[in-house]
Amino acid sequence: MKEDLTAFPLVECKNVSLSFSSRRVIEEFNLSVKAGDRIAFLGPSGCGKSTLLNLLSGLLKPTQGSVLRKVTSDKISFVFQDPSLFPWKTVRENIELVDVLANSSHTDAAALRSAIDTQLAQVGLSDFAESYPDELSGGMRMRVALARALINKPKLLLLDEPFAALDDVTRERLQDDLLKLQENNAAAFVLVTHNIEEALYLCRRVFVFAQNGMVLKEYRQPESAEVVRRDSPALHDLRREVRALWFKSTRGEL
Amino acid sequence: MRSLLFFLLVLVCWEIICRASSIPSWLLPAPTAIVKALGRDTESLFKSFVFTAQLTIGAFLIAVVSGFLIGLAAHVSKNFRNSIFPFTILLQTTPVVSVAPLLIIWFRNNAFLALLACAWLVCVYPMISSTVSGLGKADANLQRLFSLYEAPMFRRLWHLELPSALPYILNGIRISGGLALVGAVGAEFVAGTGGQELGLAYRLLMAAYNQETARLFAVLAIVSAFGLLIHFALSTLENFVLKKLRLTPTSATAR
């Protein structure tokens, strides 16, 4: 009988702690990321959410505990708050370079070209392949960043507040795009955000962090749950609950 | 355009004051007298200009290449950076007049080399400093991306750090260009050109010695015009490259 590969974690954190100098940033954190997972780290600025992404990707090593990675680094992708595109390269060249960096799996230039075209079509930017980043709007640049992150067919997508700098309408459109892209590409993603609604809408597991890096609570939605509607009462109630928890934490009532 | 008009206005006022007042020409010659002085001795002044220009351009090019390579090495190797740091500070803080006599002794068989070394000392520091600081200014997120994919050093330099450093490096090149002329003329002064009738500084010294103020101004005009030419040429290059690569000037570059 064949083993179900999706059951194996891509990354597993076991009792992970991290200190910078004498300051403890991450405290006894446990997490298992499996294929197709949608996980959010939600918390105030400076609580160590982005640091956790660096631990998951292997850019940082924990001071205690272990991070086991079954996924190689060329199958991990990052999307940042700032699209961080190369201003001197066209959209196509921006995507191309990341593919080269991640040890391209594309057999030749034509295959890569066609893969880039496919990614650009997925994010609705087919007509902008030869444009430069400064010719695009903020939302379009973020779409390029998403297309770039998906070019190496990642198994794990790490999103560091990718929509924080966008207006509400663009943010919502990109959130929906992200869900579609994740579905098409079957990648797991870990999202860092301080937007409660965004975390609950996009992710099935939401870790709420306190300022000191401790996990206050982990919210889980059933695996079978359909994508939550933005205006659903369930999402609204959950949002209120998380908000109340967060407030209590900042007032030191927990 | 406005600054050119202002300059012409200053010249006209200067001419009127010199003609209308009793200021002796040895103290403040009129602009027309300066132009006459320029025209009188064109050949020797041109020869001196060529010498100083060669010295300036030579020192500038060597400073750009060597400053860039030193900066690059300091960026790549922490040990090299730590070892060389005190010496780069010395380059900036030690007046060239105090080192010139030593260089003249070392290069006594070749005055040009001694002057070149003096001018290089004056203009190399901005190149080193701007290269080191520019190479460290690449986008932090892109650095994370290159680290995630364990990109080799050369690839990181070529695709990320060097293009990101260009605004800083071009800024350093522009500053070095101006300083190369300062260094060249200063070095000629300090070295006294070893009695050789060569550069513009020699012409300045001789004019001052003979109290030929109009001639002194004429030489000064050549030096200033050359300085402006260097500045505008390098600024044009800087703007062209930055525009071509769609890079924004650094705050230090913004003029």
Image (cartoon, rainbow, N blue to C red):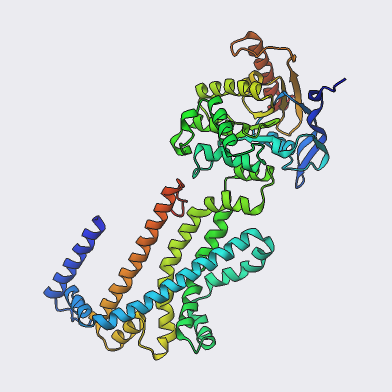
Q: Residue at x 69, y 33 (%)?
A: A49
- Looking at the picture, how far across and down is residue B120, in whole percent? 49, 73
B173 left or right of B213 in image: right
Q: Residue furthest left?
A: B20
- Looking at the picture, how far across and down is residue A102, in whole percent? 66, 40
Q: Residue at x 72, y 38 (%)?
A: A57
Foreground pick, A36 / B129: A36
For residue B28, say whether it is visible.
Answer: no
Q: Residue at x 58, y 42 (%)?
A: A97
Number of numbered discs overlaid on the protein picture = 0
Foreground pick, B172 / B43: B43
For residue B83, say whether it is visible.
Answer: yes
Vertical placement of residue A115 versus B72, above or below: above
Q: Residue furthest right?
A: A1
- Looking at the picture, how far across and down is residue B217, in whole percent? 26, 77
Foreground pick, A98 / B50: A98
- Looking at the picture, how far across and down is residue B35, in whole percent? 20, 75
Work out which quarter of the rendered image holds the C terminus of chain A and state it.
Answer: top right
Vertical placement of residue A172 versus B181, above or below: above
Work out which quarter of the rendered image holds the N terminus of chain A and state it.
Answer: top right
